[in-house]
Image (spheres, rainbow, N blue to C red):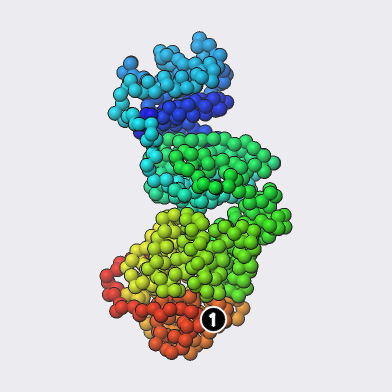
Amino acid sequence: MIESTKAIFLSYASQDAETARRVADALREAGLAVWFDQNELRGGDAWDATIRTRIKECVLFVPFISKNTESRSEGYFRLEWKLAVDRSHLMADDQAFLVPLVIDDISEAKARVPDRFRERQWSRLSDAAAFAAFAERVVQAIARQSHSDVKRVPPDQPRGASARKAIAVLPLANMSADPENEYFSDGVTEDIINALAKVPGIQVASRTSSFAFKGKDVDVRQIGEKLSVTSVLSGSVRKVGNRIRIVVQFVNVESGYHIWSETYDRQLEDVFAIQDEISRAIVDALKLQLVEGRADLVVPTRNIEAYNLYLRGRFFFNKYTESGLRRGLDFFQQALMQDPGFARAFAGIADCWSDLGDDWVAPDDAYPRAKAAATRALEYDPNLADAMTSLGKVLCWYEWDFAAAARQLERAVSVNPSHAEAHYVLGTTLPAIGRLDEAIEEMRKAITLDPLSAQFSRWLGRFLLYSFDYAGAIAQTLKTLELDAGYFQAYLDVGAAHLALGDPEQALTWWRKGQMLDSSVRSYDAFIVRALAPLNRLEEAAEILARLEEESRHQYVRAETLAMGYAAIGDADRAFLLLERAVQARSAGLIYLQIEPGYLPLRKDPRFGELARRIGLKQAPLPPASTPAASVSTSLPR
């Protein structure tokens, strides 16, 4: 087998793509790296720059000569030919670089090719055996060159076999005429991610991180560096009526060259089989074994319209806004009208209600609905990690059955170790049972799987705050704001860390900045009161609290957050009345009552211990003496 840090460039007319694919397969079978561009959208500055780089770096350039190239006076393949010829003029005459390949019965005399091609020996593909023969000729040509970047390795040590199997599935581009079909290409991408995440031995970047590159022209090497992956799957989806075409390329991050590529032209109802075939092809390319006894194909629903509606629901759910969550709910419910036993649709409903709870919908209205949907999902599919995760949220955040929540979530990460959301929710549960250190580790695992998730990064910063690592909390939360400068909760945590360090002015600056964002939730204006109180600006504090009290008469305001404001100004009685209201509403914020710095003024009151016991929380240590504020320096993001 031959391994090269460079690759063989295949240049062909688009009509010859199938023959080019067969040649690429034969070369790979011979142990050669191949750059084989199957991108449907060719041209543009980014494509031009990529092509120039590939031709500048390739070991051999193989131009395909055919009746199709003969008939075309213009084409991108002609630009490729020109670039390759230009490079060849810089080489010694006996240097093997141009390897013309005739793929049909076109005569050499009539072929419209650069003169430089005629100076080289041509190969022909006369029959099926000619593919392997051509590959062997190329192997010998490279061996004769004795390039320093080409080496032989034993056949029992396949290229990259010992490398860490970490991959990212980039959003498949929507190539349909209707831009509304974006939901479908996004949904197929997400399902491929989920399928690969279940394969032992593969670490798969989660959806949030992969979709951060949606619509962006980023080199795969950069993607590999940002996501800590060794290979990337990309491609496109075209949906026309009841037919779909999915084109995918699996690329090595280090070299930038294709490991494997394929085109699937099928009926829409074959979409699940295509996803399974793609997953299996990747597993095979990575030299892994599927789990013994793994089902050949999991079909979540036999009703393709239900699947379409489900994908629309996921599309809106992933917008993470109140309106998006509510639209997602509507589509999931429509999916169930088409297929009443569709477990994933029930799980989608559970996801929406659990995310709407607390910030937009009263807990006692949202979480029971989430639990009912998650329970139904698990009745139809007992191993659905999404449903286990949603059920874990309800058990922890609403029912306060922390031990049961931990068991449910530990089962979810056991079923699907690459499920970043399950690690995150497990992390949110563990502090309630006195396992804050383990919670921090779970957040780190979630970030490893989803390194571009601002949500997971923010929660790691929050837990560092709870563990009294204020400098670490600030540093982590600034990383969060690099990922998403509009993530208002991150401003809350930086401000809280500064207040714990004895700097209410900095805290006030950060909290006001955060609450000015469109994404902010009005309940958290109470945090501003916590900074105003030590600055003795009590009139301003009272005005904010009065406004929040008035708003709470007309809309849901988190009572436990409002209680922090009253605790800061020394009104413990009002604070405990609000905390009691939060208990009645089963507000999720109460599960951190023992470790949230905002409740420190109440910790010595006997009513506090009684409240913690009712919630089921273990006693937590008090923070050490405050660290001098001068020891930490931060600046607001622009």
Rendered image quadrant of residue 538: bottom left
Location of residue 627 in the rendering, given as x and y in whole percent from the top left corner: 29, 75
Q: The residue tagged with tag 1: helix, strand or loop? A: helix
Number of residue marks: 1
Q: Residue at x 41, y 41 (%)?
A: 253
Q: Tell me if mark 1 has few (under 14), some (14-19) or many (20+) residues whose alpha carbon lies within 10 angstroms of its own.
A: some
Residue that lies at the very extreme toward the top in this rendered image? 109
Q: Nearer the viewer, residue 323 or 363?
A: 363
Q: Residue at x 56, y 69 (%)?
A: 394
- Look at the image and tell me in which quarter the C terminus lies: bottom left
Looking at the picture, which amino acid does disc 1 mark?
A: Val
Residue that lies at the very extreme toward the right in this rendered image? 337
**Residue 324, visible in the rendered structure:** no
> Which residue is the site of mark 1?
583
Location of residue 153 in the rendering, given as x and y in whole percent from the top left corner: 34, 31
**Residue 251, visible in the rendered structure:** yes
Q: Nearer the viewer, residue 257 or 293?
A: 293
Location of residue 51 in the rendering, given as x and y in whole percent from the top left corner: 44, 32
Q: Nearer the viewer, residue 476 or 401?
A: 401
Examine the rendered structure and indicate whether residue 472 appears above or below residue 272: below
Q: Nearer the viewer, residue 392 or 452?
A: 392
Examine the rendered structure and indicate whether residue 559 appears above or below residue 475: below
Q: Residue at x 46, y 80 (%)?
A: 564
Examine the rendered structure and indicate whether residue 44 appears above or below residue 197: above
